[in-house]
Amino acid sequence: MSHTMKQCLHLRNPHVLGVISLIIILGSLNVKVAECRVYSGLANIEYPAINCRKHSAVLTDFGGVGDGKTSNTKVFESAITKLSQYASDGGATLIVPPGKWLTGPFNLTSHFTLFLQKGAVILASQNELEWPHLPVLPSYGRGRDAPGGRFSSLIFGTNLTDVVITGQNGTIDGQGSYWWDKFHKKQLTLTRPYMIEIMYSDKIQISSLTLVNSPTWFVHPVYSSNIIITGLTILAPVDSPNTDGIDPDSCTNTRIEDCYIVSGDDCIAVKSGWDEYGIKFGKPTQHLVIRRVTCISPDSAMVALGSEMSGGIEDVRVEDLTAINTESAIRIKTAVGRGAYVKNIFVRGLNLNTMKYVFWMTGSYGEHPDPKFDPKALPIITGINYKDIVAKNVTYSAKLEGISNDPFTGICISNVTIQVSAQQKKLQWNCTNVAGITNNVTPSPCALLPQKDKTDCVFPNDKLPIENVQFKTCSL
Ligand SMILES: *[C@@H]1O[C@H](CO)[C@@H](O)[C@H](O)[C@H]1NC(C)=O
Ligand SMILES: *[C@@H]1O[C@H](CO)[C@@H](O)[C@H](O)[C@H]1NC(C)=O
Ligand SMILES: *[C@@H]1O[C@H](CO)[C@@H](O)[C@H](O)[C@H]1NC(C)=O
Ligand SMILES: *[C@@H]1O[C@H](CO)[C@@H](O)[C@H](O)[C@H]1NC(C)=O
Ligand SMILES: *[C@@H]1O[C@H](CO)[C@@H](O)[C@H](O)[C@H]1NC(C)=O
Ligand SMILES: *[C@@H]1O[C@H](CO)[C@@H](O)[C@H](O)[C@H]1NC(C)=O
């Protein structure tokens, strides 16, 4: 680490400045202040975050080269290792300046902010040797693409607290085509990397970024709590494989808002582990709010619950979402062998345009990690509330398919207007093994969901603790 870098770190520490009293030292330090500012071009950058940091450094302080060709893997690693020493002294920010920063995966640290300036692009390496291998997730028992292990995500963090990934809408480009090709050619022996994965962690913010072309899922908080994801633009070709936008997985207290997602798989997929592995791990996704998200995903759902839901999914509040040319709005996916539950789901205020199914529940999703799943592990699907929905150009209003001897119950649908397309299908509501009520819904629902006058489906009035978390205004 360079001498200049040390001085910059200290100078950005107001406490250190405050205890220096000798004029002659201050005089010499002032020169360095100017040097640092000119060097990094960071005047007057303010941004919202759950926590501000006392220290900061720029990637170039550690020898980063932003030419899009030179690997910065070691640079990110040494920068974050160095900055991790400030965890107990006000934390640190690593600033990624404008440029194209090619890198393999790197690990985050606690009380840390990764800040991508406007014009900064982190490019994921396509050299597989740069990608460490990780063991499979315990709640899945195997990888999604291959039974063996998995590649580390590009940006990975585990057992952390207080981590922020943000910026001035800088970009992270997963350069996913390399991995999509391998997937299509069935050449993968390990599961593809996610773009961002945060595991066993608390107090996470991911915001104000553009994420493009992830190798598979984009943002995967897993076994974590108190997560805020806001202001993300997530873009992948609509035919790219498994490019889910945001997948909260066995997480508690999560807030996802103000995102725009175009993807080849579910825009948001709520998960909690797979069959016997998820049941044993037993960690639900609960207390989740999703609001003001726009989704385009012609072959998948705006919000999917499952199909991996074997730790349970509970207390999900979905509000003010827009979908354009998306296969379905909210889709519950499960199967015999999943066990656990999806319950207390509250949805209101959907604006949908061009969709195959507005309401879709699938009890026969299949896809098991191995044949050892328990055929007696039946999922309980109950307390599913939908209201205030307007949909245009729809092929089927609903396909609601429960499990025989295990009906999906407590379904409530009210105040819904569905305008069917010119190519409308005759059977608008196809319902099997479901029970519930409806009110003020057109076209008329199936006999299993009879009309009950004055029904206004529930949406909770209280706020989740994560909704009350306020951002501070931080500056660089
Ligand atoms: C990140 O940490 C995990 C262990 O938690 C380790 O296996 C992996 O190699 C680390 N990745 C990098 C890029 O150092
Ligand atoms: C991370 O936390 C999990 C769950 O508490 C624990 O099992 C694991 O050993 C921890 N890993 C590290 C590297 O501390
Ligand atoms: C961020 O960048 C993306 C891609 O260029 C753009 O579509 C989006 O509108 C930008 N968001 C903001 C808040 O500027
Ligand atoms: C019905 O839903 C529409 C569209 O979301 C909304 O504007 C309207 O206020 C709702 N009506 C009632 C009675 O809640
Ligand atoms: C209506 O949906 C069909 C697909 O079902 C699509 O081809 C057509 O472009 C949509 N029309 C409008 C006006 O969005
Ligand atoms: C209705 O759904 C059931 C169960 O998924 C399916 O077997 C049947 O073919 C569907 N009927 C029509 C007319 O689509």
Image (cartoon, rainbow, N blue to C red):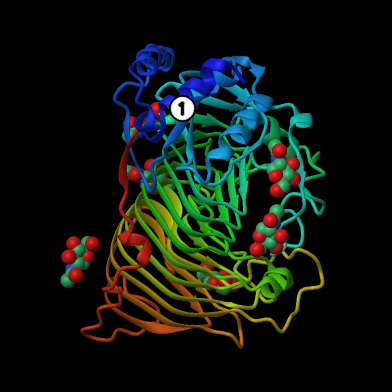
- Residue 127 coordinates in the image, percent (x, y): 74, 26
Q: Residue furthest front?
A: 22
Placement of 85 over or under 436, stated as above or below? above
Quadrant of the rendered image containing residue 261: top left
At 63% from the left and 37% from the top, the residue drawn is 154
Quadrant of the rendered image containing residue 209: top left
Quadrant of the rendered image containing residue 282: bottom right
Placement of 2 over or under 306, stated as above or below? above
At 81% from the left and 39% from the top, the residue drawn is 187
Kind of residue sitting beneath label 1: His
At 68% from the left and 26% from the top, the residue drawn is 74
At 34% from the left and 32% from the top, the residue drawn is 18
The number of callouts visible is 1
Ligand number 2: quarter of image: bottom right
| Residue at the spot of label 1 | 10
Nearer-the-camera pick, 441 or 467:
467
- Residue 455 coordinates in the image, percent (x, y): 25, 82
Q: Is mark 1 within 8 Å of ligand 1?
A: no
Instruction: Determine whether, in the image, residue 469 is placed left or right of residue 277.
Output: left
Can see residue 100? no
Can see residue 362? yes
Quarter holding the C terminus?
A: top left
Nearer-the-camera pick, 125 or 241:
125
Instruction: Determine whether, in the image, residue 251 is placed left or right of residue 140.
Output: left
- Residue 271 coordinates in the image, percent (x, y): 57, 62
Instruction: Determine whether, in the image, residue 137 is placed left or right of residue 214.
Output: right
Placement of 167 over or under 68, stated as above or below? below
Nearer-the-camera pick, 103 or 404:
103
- Residue 321 coordinates in the image, percent (x, y): 33, 54
Quarter holding the N terminus?
A: top right
